[in-house]
Structures are given as C-alpha cells and as structure tokens.
Amino acid sequence: MAAAALPQLAQAQALEKTKLTIAVGGKNLFYYLPLTIAEQLGYFKAEGLDVTIVDFAGGSRALQAVVGGSADVVSGAFEHTINMQFKGQPMRAFVLQGAAPQIVLGVNPKTLPNFKSVADLKGKKIGVTAPGSSTNVLANFVLAKAGLKPSDVSFVGVGAGSGAVAAMRAGQIDAMSNLDPVITLLTRSGDMRIVTDTRNMAEAEKVFGGPMPAGCLYAPQPFLDKHPHTAQALANAMVRANKWIQQAGGGDIIKAVPESYLLGDRAVYIDGFLAAKQAMSVDGSFPAKGAETAFRALASVDDKLAAAKLNLNAVYTNDFVKKANAKYPRG
C-alpha cells in the first residue's frame, strides 16, 4: 500500500503549488462542464491538487477575481486573453473546454411577437450572464452584423441560472444571450425563440468566420512561468474530463453533476447536454486559427482593439495539452 502511494507523493512534491483557486462564471452551465467533471470525478485530486472553485455571475467577474489576486486561474471564455493582452496584462489559455461558444441568442416571444430580424432589437433590453462576459461579446457581434452598435440596446446582467429563466418568463428582457441548460429550458417551455445558435459547430463557424475557441483554463503569464508543473496537473485533469464527456451518455452526466444543476428538470438537462456535447473540446487542444477568429470578433465592435498590433501566439499554448494527451491517451 505504501509503495503504491509513492508515485503520487513524488508527483505532489513536484508541484510548485498544490492549493489553488479557480474562478468561474456560471459553473452550472454546460460551457463549464469539464471543470465540474474534473472536480466531481476526482481528477484534480488524482494530480495532487487541492482545488477550490469559486463561482461568479459571469466570466467578466471571474476574470476580475484573478486580476485582483483572489483566484489563481480562470475557467472562462478564450477571448478574454486577447482583451487582457490589449490592456497590457498578459494572460494565456492552456487547456480548452469548448470547441464552440455554445452561446445562444434568442428573443422573447411575449415582448417581441412580431420579431423579423436582429435589427428589431434596437432600443430593446438584452439579458446577458454579466456585462462584458462572452454572452455580451456574442450579442455585440451579432448586433454589429445587423448594423447595430452595443449602445443601440440595453444590456442587463441576469446570471446563468434560474434568475435568467425568471427574467425571460416575466418579460423583463426582450432577448437573451445565454447558455444551456437555461436555453433548452426556455425553448422547451416556449419562452424563447432562437436567433443564433453557436452550440452547433457549423453555425458557430459561420457566425464567426472560423473556429471560435470557447471555455478554457487561462491564467496570468507569470503564474504559468512560475508554476509549470501545477499548470500541467490542471491540464491533465481537464483533458481527462474532456475525454470522459465524449464517452458519456445523459444518464452518466445526471449522476456526475450536483442536483442543483438540473434546474428541476432532468429530461431538459439531458437534452441540453446532448445539444451542447458536439461543441465541447475532444482533447483540450486549441485550433490553429482560433485566436485570429476571436480577435476578429472582438475587433468588430472595438476600433481601438482592431488597430492594435497583438501577438496572438502569446494568448494560448498547446504545450500542456500535448503532454496531457500523451499521459492519458484514453482519458
């Protein structure tokens, strides 16, 4: 028994930091499912890590936690790494969770019964998880394609759970950019009509004009420089989680996630999982053209960013993922 524990001990000793805090914005969403699976199935522990996950109302808040020093790593949207480089605070993504954004923009049939096109959203209230989050970025991008500026609408933070569902059903917002299981719940009950659906890989590539990496683990560059073994351990756990999800069915997911994630409806949760599964990363790798696609999306609504000369190779790395896949070829 003692001999079996030795490799584990040696590995834990090699880690520069074993106690870590990961900030996330809307942990119950399928967007972050690999994070929950890595936690619930003990993959972080297996790598010698003691991980605390702190949940915020949206990705922009999770990012603020790392910038402020109360968290080490963000599980969040890839495009934040580009914004942060632009702001002179280099962050780097090191393992992918989502191969497509999984964000859905839909309108409220109660308040917009005669909706014809995105242009009809002028002057309306659009719910997002939190202002500045990836749900906001997608909405901005879709509005821009219809000739609308972000200032042509009002954005309202509604979170990523039952509050978002309630805001839509009560008619407090005219449209919403959000994720599953919220979307499946609202479309099932007839409280949302889908306009843009990036759970579908083909539609996501069409919307963004290329592969758009989504949820990932990212951290300040100095953190990765100082803690390469710790970052490797995180990547190992996430790659295992990605591979487990690819082989999982609806019943497996129900057993693995906390009851509160189901929003009171197991059937809807399973439907949401099946809709989102195709948009999840198979092995944690970032696509070669992903950073360019994300930059274009952000630049379409930010002239200053569009004019900036950024090093897009510095916002992600596949080095940790390659080693993780070599260690866990089958998950």
Image: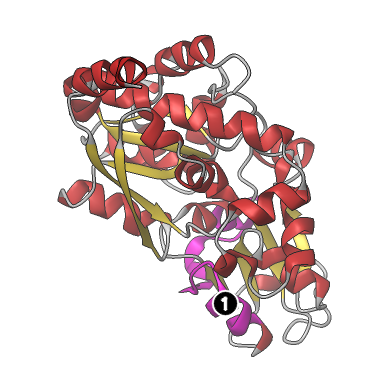
Question: Looking at the image, can residue 281 be seen?
Answer: no
Q: In the rendered image, which quarter is residue 73 located in?
A: top left
At which x and y percent is residue 290? 55, 26
Q: Secondary structure at mark 1?
A: helix
At which x and y percent is residue 219? 30, 35
Question: Looking at the image, can residue 41 be seen?
Answer: yes
Residue type at mark 1?
Answer: Ser
Q: Is residue 250 left or right of residue 46?
A: right
At which x and y percent is residue 282? 65, 27
Q: Is residue 240 left or right of residue 230?
A: right
Task: Classify the position of the N terminus by image quarter.
Answer: top left
Q: Is residue 245 above or below residue 227?
A: below
Q: As rendered, which of 172 and 86 lies closer to the eye?
A: 172
Q: As rendered, which of 96 and 231 lies closer to the eye?
A: 231
- Residue drawn at x 39%, y 36% as measured from the top left: 44
Which residue bears the numbered disc 1?
162
- Residue drawn at x 79%, y 70% as measured from the top left: 187
Q: Which residues are magenta?
A: 139-168
Q: Is residue 152 left or right of residue 168?
A: left
- Residue drawn at x 76%, y 57% as measured from the top left: 270
Q: Is residue 301 left or right of residue 61?
A: right
- Residue drawn at x 23%, y 48% as measured from the top left: 71
Q: Is residue 218 magenta?
A: no
Q: Is residue 52 above or below residue 173?
A: above
